[in-house]
Image (cartoon, rainbow, N blue to C red):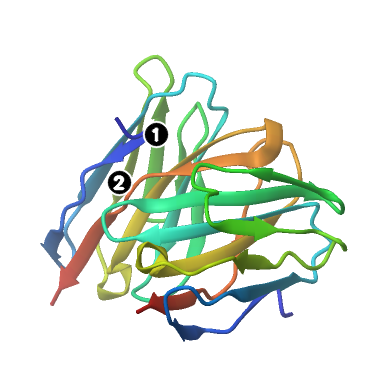
Amino acid sequence: RKEVEQDPGPFNVPEGATVAFNCTYSNSASQSFFWYRQDCRKEPKLLMSVYSSGNEDGRFTAQLNRASQYISLLIRDSKLSDSATYLCVVSRIINNDMRFGAGTRLTVKP
Amino acid sequence: NAGVTQTPKFQVLKTGQSMTLQCAQDMNHEYMSWYRQDPGMGLRLIHYSVGAGITDQGEVPNGYNVSRSTTEDFPLRLLSAAPSQTSVYFCASSSLGGMNTEAFFGQGTRLTVV
């Protein structure tokens, strides 16, 4: 079983739609949680960290449920530019050990 | 603002050849790491380093060597290339420790072993 599991998609949504991605992790020692965005044939870049209380950055909202070992990302009012692969990442502080999900691919269509 | 620089961007090797992927960062980060990305697998950690002179193995270290003689550089060596090493390789760096530490990635190296 992979340490970080994501629905691979693809998610194909129209502009303006709301879309949600889910992620589960198996290591209860994980301490930091992130969503990274990766455009086609590019490197991953940090989209947002995920805090225990949940956090929002514009159209993006991230939630963490430590008890269920579950992380989510909600994108509201999707834009064409949101088309990318979204990577769920968990890490332990010791040694910055980051584990990646396989990614969820999103395509936003006009 | 160079960040993390990887070279080369593309490489084709014959089975059995060796090569070194270069990685340099200018952010004075203690932590550097190498990942490979394969379809459907996500990024998997090959080797990492928490500072000059210190390296350790990640999830998939076999067939790869690393060294960290300076804070800035962290080269990855393929000892004897195999077709199973065909992948996209990413180097990353970050500050060490602390919550929610962002990792910065190089642009990647697309390696094909024939």
Q: Position of residue A67 (x, y in %)?
A: 40, 14
Question: Could you tell me the amino acid type at mark 2?
Answer: Leu
- Judging depth in this view, the residue of A63 and A56 nearest the camera is A63
| Residue at 36% in and 62% down | B84
Q: Can you say whether B79 is above or below A35 in the image? A: below
Q: Chain of mark 1?
A: A
Q: Position of residue B103 (x, y in %)?
A: 62, 55
Q: CA distance from mark 1 to mark 2?
A: 8 Å
Label 1: state its secondary structure: strand
Contact? badges 1 and 2 (CB < 8 Å): yes
Residue A97, quarter of picture: top right
| Residue at 67% in and 49% down | B48
Q: Position of residue A80 (x, y in %)?
A: 25, 74
Residue corresponding to mark 1? A63
Q: Can you say whether B19 is above or below B40 in the image? A: below
Question: Could you tell me the amino acid type at mark 1?
Answer: Gln
Residue corresponding to mark 2? A74
| Residue at 74% in and 72% down | B24
Residue A20, quarter of picture: top left
Q: Can you say whether A87 is above or below B5 in the image? A: above
Label 2: state its secondary structure: strand
Residue located farthest toward the top when viewing the structure as drawn: A67
Q: Chain of mark 2?
A: A
The reply, left or right, for residue B56 in relation to residue A53 is: right
Disc 1 crowd, CA 10 A, few/some/many (<14, 14-19, 20+): many
Please give the label number shown on residue B70.
none
Residue located farthest toward the front when viewing the structure as drawn: B16
Residue A7, quarter of picture: top left
Q: Position of residue B68 (x, y in %)?
A: 80, 59
